[in-house]
Image (cartoon, rainbow, N blue to C red):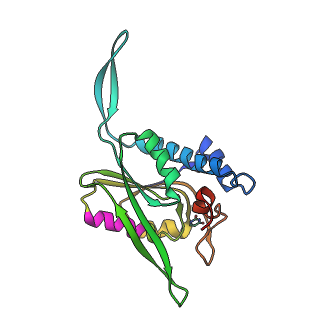
Amino acid sequence: MVTILTKQNSIANHFLAELRDVNIQTDRMRFRRNLERLGEIMAYEISKTFEYKSSEVDTPLGVANTHLLSTQPVIATIIRAGLPFHQGLLNYFDGADSAFIAAYRHTKKSGEFEIHKKYQNTPNLDGKVVIMADPMLATGRSLVLCCKDLLSDYDIKELHIATIIASEEGLQHVRAFLPDVQLWIGAVDNELTSKSYIVPGLGDAGDLAFGNK
Ligand code: URA
């Protein structure tokens, strides 16, 4: 299942427009906050697919029939650009555990690159619903590698991928290699540069959020 948020008329469009805008995205605090706000909106959308249990709570004036989230998901993130987006998801799934993965592109002499995973710190994901937060889905290769590793290491109950901008190519790659995941995307852009930047995209999300290397 693929859900594209900006196909609906909502404030998500406004936050995404600010992330893309060269005249606004240089405000680093605002850029991080907009990533976080889109994480919050995505958490809300994903939460509609989760299970809830009935419960009664005491109010000052009586007893109310309510619904509580049955189990908290685990939020997994590929650092570093994913961190503000991760925080947005955690703001809503406030009892969730977190998993962190670092992966980088190793460019070979031929100009081709391969993905190397450098670090992974994750709780036990057996039986868990996992949301993998990766704001920019460019080629999809690091995302697929990280998700496949988690799926082979653990008996994950359900895997969601949350991303803010996906390239058409990256989206097709993820759908081909991870056919059972649920994808939540802000917007899909058509092109990738030779260095795998999304066009029109928004530039380098990690640099805009945290500074140049
Ligand atoms: N990562 C980014 O930050 N931007 C892109 O366009 C692609 C990957």
Q: How many marks?
A: 0
Q: Is residue 154 magenta?
A: no
136 lies left or right of 133: right
Q: Quadrant of residue 122?
A: bottom left
Quadrant in which the N terminus is drawn = bottom left
Of 1 and 71, nearer the camera is: 71
Q: Which residue shows up at 35% across the image and 60% down it?
A: 180
Residue 159 picture location, percent across and down:
35, 56
Of 210 and 39, nearer the camera is: 210
> Which quadrant of the picture is home to ligand 1?
bottom right
Residue 109 picture location, percent across and down:
53, 90
Of 61 and 122, nearer the camera is: 122
184 lies left or right of 61: right
Residue 173 picture location, percent across and down:
46, 70
Residue 115's place in the image compared with 132, above or below, is below
Does residue 156 appear anywhere in the picture? yes
Residue 133's place in the image compared with 41, above or below, is below
Quadrant in which the C terminus is drawn = bottom right
Residue 151 picture location, percent across and down:
30, 63
Does residue 178 appear anywhere in the picture? no
146 lies left or right of 208: left
> Looking at the image, which residue sits at the far bottom?
110
Q: Main secondary structure of the magenta part?
A: helix
> Looking at the image, which residue sits at the far top?
61
Q: Quadrant of residue 52?
A: top left
Q: Is residue 151 magenta?
A: yes
Instruction: Look at the image and give the residue range highlighted in magenta.
Output: 144-153
